[in-house]
Amino acid sequence: MNKKVLLLALVIPFLIFTGCGQFNFPTDLTFPQQQERGLSTAEVVQGLKEALTVGAQNSAFKASATNGFYQNNLIRIPFPEEAIKVKNTLEKAGLNKPIDDFVVSINRAAEDASKRAYPIFRNAITTMTITDAMGILKGGDNAATDYLRGRTYSQLKTEFSPIVKQSIDRVNVTSYWNPIATNYNLLTLLTGGEQVNPNLEEYITEQAIDGLFKLVAQEEALIRKDPAARVTDILKKVFAQQ
């Protein structure tokens, strides 16, 4: 039998067989190598939960330590902007120490309140959905931080406010503010300026929460970019895929 005849003898039965719809060539083959390199959805969710947990724990720990706010230029709480004319007036009068003492006290209040942050973060992390996880994995450098902020900001503000109020009393913020206000008011008798009394509770609460999320963003950046910051096997697997 010549080669052409042999070829037809092999091909024709194959065409007849497939034409009758009795053979479907598989189009969804997966190979062992791909399965080994890939990650299941459960692994992705677990890895991102671990990433957020590590970031939240580290951030809350750093923020709540003594000088966690005050000696960190990234999150240090400054004199309230709405009362900046008070600060400027007293500094011109040489009254710097009351200003410095007050700034230390509001940062101490934020450090004290931050001790309550992690349980709130943890609750948001445990309720993460598959959609949330995939959005974080494929999102920008701050995707995990943005998720956590969106899920916890309102609750943090609600729960932080009474804690900050207690912290203000505990670290004597008011006792540092009163001399400032008193001295400023004495000077306004000469200058005719208006008295200023900012809402310290709201100011410290918002500054404390913003500071915490700045730290979370730092932690996320480390995990995404620095392999040494991926402290568990699943973190290494998930973020190695990016």
Image (cartoon, grey):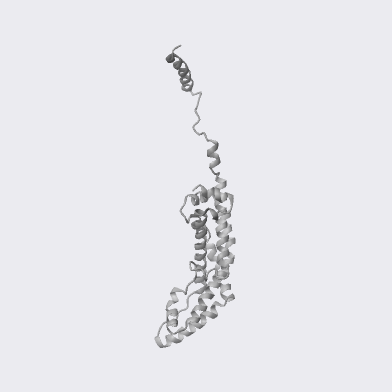
Residue at the far front in the pictured view: 228
Residue at the far top in the pictured view: 1
Disc count in the image? 0
Q: Position of residue 16 (x, y in %)?
A: 47, 19
Q: Position of residue 68 (x, y in %)?
A: 55, 68
Using the rendered image of the protein, determine whether residue 188 is visible from the camera's viewpoint.
Answer: yes
On the picture, is 84 further left or further right than 126? left
Q: Position of residue 17 (x, y in %)?
A: 49, 20
Q: Position of residue 43 (x, y in %)?
A: 57, 47
Query: Which residue lies at the image location 47% right of the left edge and 72% below the top edge?
Result: 78
Q: Is residue 141 above or below residue 73?
A: above
**Residue situated in front as seen by the camera: 82 or 226:** 226
Using the rendered image of the protein, determine whether residue 162 is visible from the camera's viewpoint.
Answer: no
Query: Which residue lies at the image location 55% right of the left edge and 45% below the top edge?
Result: 41
Query: Which residue lies at the image location 57% right of the left edge and 61% below the top edge?
Result: 58
Q: Is residue 142 above or below residue 16?
A: below
**Residue situated in front as seen by the camera: 159 or 190:** 190
Residue at the far bottom in the pictured view: 190
